[in-house]
Image (spheres, rainbow, N blue to C red):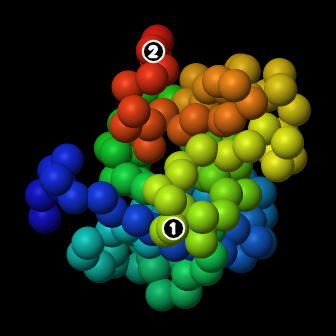
Amino acid sequence: MTFTSDYIIMLLYNWKKVLKYSGGSSKRIILILKAMTQVGMPRNKYDPVYQYYYTDFSGDSFLVNPHALLTNRNKWRDKEIADYIGLASFRNTGEYLATGKITLDLSHSPMGQDAINNNRLLRTVRNEIHFLYEDYTGEIKWQV
């Protein structure tokens, strides 16, 4: 399957369920995301994704363009990716569908400003948290 910039892929997930099944492990959170976005079935029962593949993680949280996040996984620490996924879950899906807003108000973040500043996948501009693989405005100069 080819992903192009002509399409916006939106993944709906249940953050509480992801957190529960992962035990809070960043590596397992990423495996769950991979299981939710994987096109084909796991190779066999020994594939790390297998244990999560048949679990329904659908919910009200959303990621836009999760494929890009996974494709570029080797550039980031697992903790940065897990924090990105977790923080994205605090955004309002209804607001995104109505207005296209993909940022999170800083006041709605459970993470402290230092944690956000230390995550290369996140940026704060005018009290709005921007997500690297969802920022299509070109407003932020990402230095990675």
Residue 71 in the image: x percent, y percent? 32, 44
Q: Residue 57, can we see it?
A: no
Label 2 vs label 1: CA separation?
A: 27 Å
Residue 85 in the image: x percent, y percent? 61, 52
Q: In this view, does 21 lie above or below 107?
A: below
Type of the residue with mark 1: Ala
Q: Residue 136, can we see it?
A: yes
Of the residues tagged 2 and 1, which is closer to the observer? 1
Given residues 55 and 126, the one toward you in this image is 126
User: Is 139 left, or right, of 60 in this rendering?
Assistant: left
Q: Mark 2 = which residue?
A: 141
SS at mark 1?
helix
Query: Is the residue marked by circle 2 packed among few (<14), some (14-19), or many (20+) residues within 10 Å?
Result: few
Q: Mark 1 = which residue?
A: 98
User: Which residue sits at x=67%, y=57%?
Assistant: 91
Tell me, yes or no, whether the two marked residues, 2 and 1, touch with CB atoms within 8 Å.
no
Splitting the image into 4 quarters, where does residue 30 fall? Answer: bottom right
Q: In this view, does 57 lie above or below 5?
A: below
Given residues 66 and 136, the one toward you in this image is 136
SS at mark 2?
loop
Type of the residue with mark 2: Lys
Give the quarter of the figure containing the N terminus.
bottom left
N-term-proximal mark, 2 vs 1? 1
Q: In this view, does 78 lie above or below 21?
A: above
